[in-house]
Every structure is written in C-alpha cells, then in structure tokens.
Image (cartoon, rainbow, N blue to C red):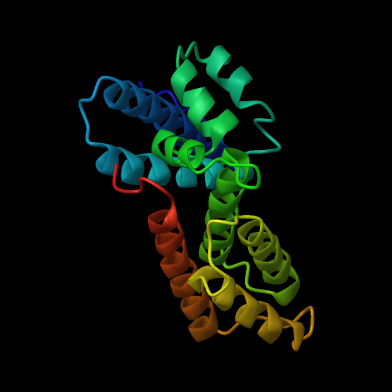
Amino acid sequence: MEVKLWNDKRERDMYENFAELYAIIRATEKLEKAYIRDIIPPSDYEIECQKLITHFKTLASTLRDIIPSIERFADTYKMDCPAAINRLVVSGVPATVEHRAAAATSSTTSAAIVAECVQNFITAMDSLKLNMVAVDQVHPLLSDLSASLNKLTILPPDFEGKTKMREWISRLSKMGAADELTEQQARQLHFDLESSYNSFMAALPNSGT
C-alpha cells in the first residue's frame, strides 16, 4: 500500500523543497571535507561551492516562512554538517574566496568587504533569474553592489564592474519605479554582472591559487 506524505500540491512542493535543502546541505558538507583533505582542486571546489551557495540562498529565501532557522532544520533531521552550516549560513562564500580576501586585507581592504561584494553580485544575478526586473527591485541591488565595489582600494577607478554598474544605475534612474526591464535588457544586465564578477575574482590577489 502506497503511503502519501502530502495531501495536495502545496504540501508536495514543500516536501520536495525540504528534500532539496537536505541534499544541498549534505553535498556542501562532503565538498568542504574534500577541499580540506586536498581531494579536489581549489578551482573546482570554488565553482561547485558557489553553485551550492547560490542554490541554497535561493531555496532558503523561498522557505523563509516555513524554515526560519536552517540550524534547527539540520537538528530536526539529525544532520551533523557543521562545515556546511558554516559555509552556507555563516560565511556565504567559498573558502577560496575567504583566503583571497584575507590576502587582500589592509587598512582599507578587508575580507568582509570582499565577501560583501561577492554576496551583492550573487544576489543581483539571482534576482534576475527569479524575474525580479522592476526598476524598484533592481536599482537598490545595483546601488549596494556599486557601493561595496567602491570600498575596495585594490580595484582601479575604471574597473569594469564599477563602470558598468554606474551605467546601469544611471539608466535605471531615468525610468519609473514600476517600469520593468525588457527580456533583452535583463539578459544584458545578467551578462554584465557575470562578466564583472569574473573580472572581480581575477582582480583579487593570489586569484590563481
């Protein structure tokens, strides 16, 4: 006899999201251990870790009302994954990014600012993927990103990310709050964000290690 865990589509979606969150936490724990033990190259680790962090943040945002505490979720399902909780909830960026940020630390440059920039890049790109394309949704995200980039003295004034964000902010400022980016504009903005993010990562000291 088949036993159903849900009574309707809403409950089914909820349990499927629970299962996906569980899988992300488990996968992150395994990835962190593999990185610590030098089983996976840093470059491969960073790519996979960033994917997991991005998926986690998107899913956690969706489940915010149902799962207010990820730590409690892990305890409820007896998940002994301290490394994953630290990476996903506390840090929010791959260990390799933290290491590069530490190398870049000076009186005006800190790991926290680098992490803030990374988070702002990811948040902006995720929002576009979720079709959040209204001006009053996009403008604050780009403003936060631009502000965090300007805090970093290791980036030159003509750094690609700074220039492109200024151009987009200027363009959005001429539009109404309720106006929305066209599909072509949203695609171009995502491309510019991704390109700027890659340039930003390459600009950090010791980016090749």
Nearer the observer, 57 or 103: 103
User: Do we see residue 9 in this rendering?
Assistant: no
Q: Residue placed at 60% from the left, 26% from the top?
A: 70
**For residue 178, above or below residue 28:** below
The outermost residue toward the front is 107
x and y percentages locating residue 102 in the rendered image: 50, 36
Q: Quadrant of residue 39?
A: top left
Vertical placement of 25 versus 160: above or below? above
Image quarter where the N terminus lies is: top left
Point 46% across, 45% down: residue? 55
Residue in the image at 54% along x and 58% along y: 121
Front residue (pair 149, 36)? 149
Give me the residue at 54% from left, 47% from top.
58
As rendered, which of 1 and 23 lies closer to the eye? 23
- Estimate the x, y position of residue 174 in percent, counting from the top left: 75, 89
Q: Is residue 13 above or below residue 131?
A: above
State how many labels appear.
0
| Residue 92 in sight here | yes
